[in-house]
Amino acid sequence: MPSKMRIMQNLKMLVAVGGLVIVTTQHPTTGQVSTLYLESPAFSAQEMIPRKYTCDGQDINPPLAIRNIPEKTRSLALIVDDPDAPMGLFTHWILWNIPPNTMMIQENTVPKGAIEGHNSFNQNHYGGPCPPGRGTHHYQFRLFALDSTLAIPAGSSRQALLKAMEHHVVGQTMMVGLYRRHS
């Protein structure tokens, strides 16, 4: 996908540490290097996402802690997806124009000023893990630091978000959580 390729052009170093992917990026204009972190107080990387945050529970977004936001960040964007879905990549939540001073996305909330987009459930809000069958799926929580706010309307698609982010990524990180359904 060309949009994804352009976003990754700024990638300098990628280190995977137990399910937490630490991405060090260098801004193409300023040369600033940053390491952005995303964690959840509800579960650790490569561990099971609590049922509460899935379709089998309350189906609300988990709390997410953000650290080390690059200095030139003007907004943040979040994409939560499942690459293990039978029909291909399944988007659970997209969120952009998150204020750059956001250190925590609280459980069951959208930060003030942030905008939600259209997910694969055909909704404009968080849809929790809900894998078919019994296999374990990997849920990618990908956070992007951007050097601008994005002028795309609420309800925009993942593709529109990726296109709008082109040439604006100054930092990114990913945390992976797991979930499997029990009969």
Image: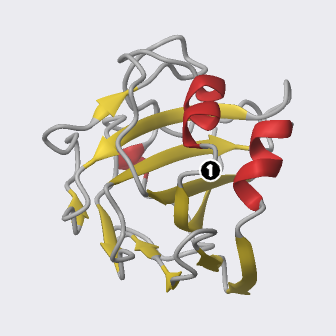
Q: Position of residue 132 (x, y in %)?
A: 72, 30
Q: Residue furthest front?
A: 29
Instruction: Examine the image and state in which quarter residue 17 appears.
Output: bottom right
Q: Describe residue 148's horizontal placement relative to residue 109 as left or right.
A: right
Instruction: Examine the image and state in which quarter residue 124 appears.
Output: top left
Residue at (38%, 39%) from the top-left corner? 96
Q: Describe residue 57's horizontal placement relative to residue 84 as left or right.
A: left
Q: Position of residue 84 (x, y in %)?
A: 80, 43
Q: In this view of the protein, can residue 41 be seen by the observer? A: no
Is residue 115 positioned above or below 19 on the image?
above
Residue at (49%, 58%) from the top-left corner? 143
Is residue 171 positioned above or below 96 on the image?
below
161 or 120: nearer the viewer: 161
Quadrant in which the N terminus appears? top right
Q: How many marks?
A: 1
Q: Describe residue 182's horizontal placement relative to residue 148 as left or right.
A: right
63 or 15: nearer the viewer: 15
The three-letter code of the residue at mark 1 reads His
Residue at (19%, 65%) from the top-left corner? 101
Residue at (54%, 52%) from the top-left corner? 168
Mark 1 Cα within 10 Å, few/some/many (few <14, many 20+)?
some
Q: In this view of the protein, can residue 100 be seen by the observer? A: yes
Is residue 98 positioned above or below 177 on the image?
above
Quadrant in which the C terminus appears? top right
Helix, strand or loop status at disc 1: loop
Q: Position of residue 136 (x, y in %)?
A: 74, 53
Q: Residue furthest top?
A: 122
173 or 182: nearer the viewer: 173
Q: Describe residue 181's horizontal placement relative to residue 170 as left or right.
A: right
Identify the residue under disc 1. Answer: 167
